[in-house]
Amino acid sequence: MIDLQRSIVLALGASMALAGFTLRAQAPAAVEANHGPAAQQPVAAAGAKSQEPASANAAVQPHDNRYTIGNTDVLAINVWKEPEISRSLPVRSDGRISLPLVGEIQAAGKTPLQLEQAIAARLQEYITNPEVTVMVEQINSEKFNILGMVQKPGSYPLALTTTLLDAIAEAGGFRDFAKLKKIYVLRQNANGGETRIPFNYKDVIQGKHPEQNVKLQPNDTVVVP
């Protein structure tokens, strides 16, 4: 009986030892599966993607060539991979700006795209294939006027997308007894005359005649009777 019990104990011990050996033999394979080349490949790919310069594509995109830079406008000028030259600065009252390696250059009267090309031409003496981006951060040279029954009548900087509703909001809204159906815009014509553009505020905010919510142009005057 004792010999039988001893045989059972020895058999159990051998089975446990064999199981432990099996687990230890499988562990390195599991580690290799989790940390081998196949597991590291997505990380390496993500790292390679993150090394691509984010601004490279943006720097070569053409810009809207309709806006003309004016005095006191604030420009953001970026020369790719040249942080010593890149900066934000206002256009001086003489219409010029100054940059390292570029020196004095005329900005007023040019579009952002034209100024990019002019700066790049100056930099070619020092930099191979310079990539220049010019963005208008703040428009101060073009203005519109708003008069009459608004909270803050006066002259305001004109953004590229300023509409009549934007102008009214910027002027603080209406005063009491404003005639909301008889608002109009006075716009100067090329021949020296003026065009009167009607604007019915109540209709527009109700979704009627949205075409009346025109984009303002430089020197437009909004009149709120």
Image (tube, rainbow, N blue to C red):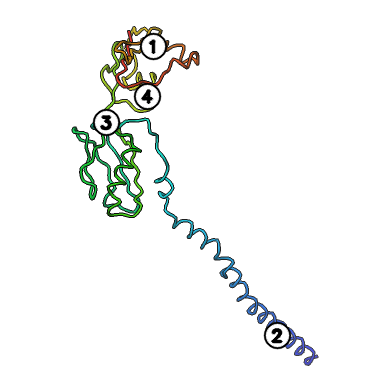
Task: Please identify, in this view, whether the residue under mark 1 or under mark 4 is nearer the observer.
Answer: 1
* Label 1 – label 2 distance at C-alpha: 99 Å
Which quadrant of the structure image shows residue 157?
A: top left
Q: What residue did someone put label 4 on? A: 162
Q: What residue did someone put label 2 on? A: 13
Residue 70, disc: 3
- Residue at image position (25%, 18%) is 154
Q: What residue did someone put label 1 on? A: 197
Is the residue marked by circle 1 packed among few (<14), some (14-19), or many (20+) residues within 10 Å? few
Amino acid bearing label 1: Ile
Question: On screen, 42 above or below 68?
Answer: below
Residue 161's x, y, as percent?
A: 39, 26
Q: Nearer the viewer, residue 87 or 147?
A: 87
* Label 1 – label 4 distance at C-alpha: 16 Å
The reply to whether the C-beta atoms of the residues labelled 1 and 4 are less than 8 Å apart is: no
Amino acid bearing label 4: Thr
| 85 left or right of 203 in image | left
Residue 37's x, y, as percent?
A: 57, 69
